[in-house]
Amino acid sequence: MANKKIKSKYLPAVKEVIRLIGGKENLQGAAHCATRLRLVLKDNSLADTKAIGELDFVKGSFVAGDQLQIIFGAGTVNDVYAVFVEEAGISGMSLGDVKQQSAQKQNAFQRSIKALSDVFVEIIPGLLAAALLMGLTGLLSQKGIFGPQSVVEMFPVIAGFNRFISIMSTGIFTILPLLVVYSATKRFGGNPVLGLVLGAIMLHPDLANAYLVGNGTVKPEVINLFGLKVSLVAFQGVLLLR
């Protein structure tokens, strides 16, 4: 519960926010992050985001991810949230709860796209780092950028460094299926360790390397599995099951 000083300071703005979102009856859930008040509304079209953005203490207002997000700034948003939930007569929610409320408003196609994107969110930083390192090693190895020779050829002392960077840039792709299965298991509520086990099976060394099978240098072993002929091929570089 907000103390009297905080309540008297932010209550006028909070009352206006509630009015401009279509009233308490249009409010489905509320939470806050480091800087923003995040609201899930039954009907986003009833919210006047422009007018909300012009209120005292508000630094901006917009709808994203099926949430109305109102920017108050670090520190301020905590006090505003305490006054807001008290005035709106709702219980406090976590960001996860608000995301679930938002997801319930989406159709089946939107939910499936969001579920797929959630799986890759945790992997994206690693992929971006790999891409940057690939760009760096390409810059050092490519001839004709700084002269007829590559940077590595002009300065052999950095050859070892470039080789190390090259290994780092491709490392994530050797275990990409492992990371995808781990993230997917977390996303859908399973045991992440079991996800890692499944990913390890997909990359087992007894399975033929998918790249070598693809270029025809290796012929995979074929087994009979209850009448089905199954090629024992690993999942190097594969994100979705074939």
Image (cartoon, rainbow, N blue to C red):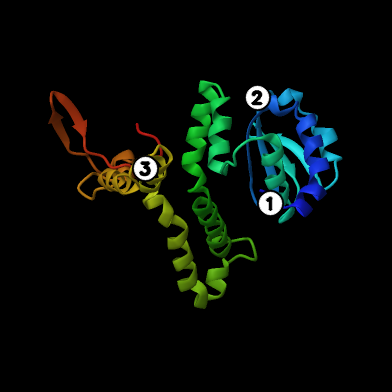
> Counting other residues with Cα less than 10 Å from the Cα at mark 1, is it few (<14), some (14-19), or many (20 or more)?
many
Q: Amino acid at mark 3?
A: Val
Q: Amino acid at mark 1?
A: Asn
Residue 135, image x and y in percent? 57, 57
Q: Nearer the viewer, mark 2 or mark 3?
A: 2
The answer to whether mark 2 and mark 1 are in CB contact below 8 A is no
Furthest residue to the front?
Answer: 4
Residue placed under numbered mark 1 in the picture: 78
Q: Is residue 60 left or right of residue 84?
A: right
The answer to whether mark 1 and mark 3 are in CB contact below 8 A is no
Which mark identifies residue 42? 2
Q: Secondary structure at mark 1?
A: helix
> Counting other residues with Cα less than 10 Å from the Cα at mark 2, is it few (<14), some (14-19), or many (20 or more)?
some
Q: Residue at x 75, y 29 (%)?
A: 21
Residue placed under numbered mark 3 in the picture: 181
Residue 143, image x and y in percent? 57, 61
